[in-house]
Image (spheres, grey):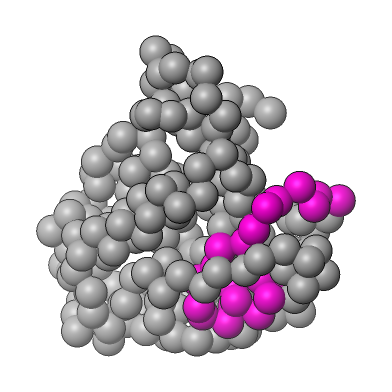
């Protein structure tokens, strides 16, 4: 694995908390802004999830978004591996409001300035009738901090969404919301964070 150091000076004497971040697979209906819409995985999306965890059973527990494109697979995997599962409400995706279910092209046609702000200045963005991105960042970051507080030194699998996983990367690597769109996490992709107390983080790709 290649390694991106977030803090080269961080002490490495304590056992790290290892968190595998896994985005859900493709969903029924194709590429669109799902957000809080509780859509199911497609058959291909389920295959992507199984491939992402194939041959890996080293986790102590699984943490999942409550939306079924994450939670159903998380439940099945936790049962098969006989490890604890926690459903974390605050790991849900951004609420896209009036854009829910639309393709990006359709959302742009409906509100070009608001979608441009979402991509270029997320700290100031709020989808029409949806959730401010700054509030989204606050709730996901709070969930991430709780996870680290309650499970130090454990090996965790966290199953979530593109947006929520990007917020976690920002929090772990000490980056601002301006960097939100610099991470591209594909469907069924998995990456690993190692958190070394008290503040060092390593991203393993």
Image location (x, y in percent) of residue 132: 19, 68
Give, as a single range, the part of the protein colored magenta.
55-75
| Residue 51 position by quadrant | bottom right
- Where residue 119 appears, x then y in whole percent? 28, 56
Q: Does the magenta stretch include residue 104?
A: no
> Residue pushed farthest left?
124
Between 106 and 96, the one lying in front of the other is 96
Q: Which residue is drawn at 68% across and 28% down?
A: 1
Q: Which residue is drawn at 45% across and 52% down?
A: 150
Whether residue 68 is situated above or below residue 147 in the rendered picture = below
Residue that protrudes farthest toward the top in the picture: 9
- Residue drawn 56% across the image and 39% down it: 153
Indicate whether 90 appears above or below 184. below
| Image height of 161 relative to 122, above or below | below
Q: Is residue 80 left or right of residue 195?
A: right
Compared to residue 6, the image places residue 141 above or below, namely: below
In the picture, measured across the screen, residue 122 lies left or right of residue 8, that is left
Q: Nearer the viewer, residue 203 or 57?
A: 57
């Amino acid at each position: 694995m290649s390694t991106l150091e977030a803090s080269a000076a961080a002490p490495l004497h304590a056992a790290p908390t290892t968190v595998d971040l896994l985005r859900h697979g493709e969903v029924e209906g194709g590429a669109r802004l799902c957000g809080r819409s509780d859509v199911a995985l497609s058959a291909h999306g389920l295959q992507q999830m199984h491939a992402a965890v194939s041959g890996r059973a080293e986790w102590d527990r699984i943490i999942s978004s409550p939306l079924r494109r994450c939670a159903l697979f998380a439940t099945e995997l936790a049962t098969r591996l006989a490890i604890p599962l926690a459903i974390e409400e605050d790991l849900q995706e951004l609420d896209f409001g009036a854009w829910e279910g639309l393709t990006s092209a359709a959302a742009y046609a409906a509100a070009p300035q608001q979608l441009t702000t979402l991509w270029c200045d997320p700290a100031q963005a709020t989808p029409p009738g949806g959730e401010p991105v700054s509030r989204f960042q606050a709730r996901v970051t709070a969930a991430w901090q709780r996870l680290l507080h309650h499970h130090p030194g454990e090996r965790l699998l966290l199953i979530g969404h593109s947006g929520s996983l990007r917020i976690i990367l920002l929090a772990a690597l000490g980056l601002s919301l301006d960097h939100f769109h610099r991470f591209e996490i594909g469907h069924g992709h998995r990456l690993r964070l190692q958190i070394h107390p008290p503040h060092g983080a390593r991203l393993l790709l």
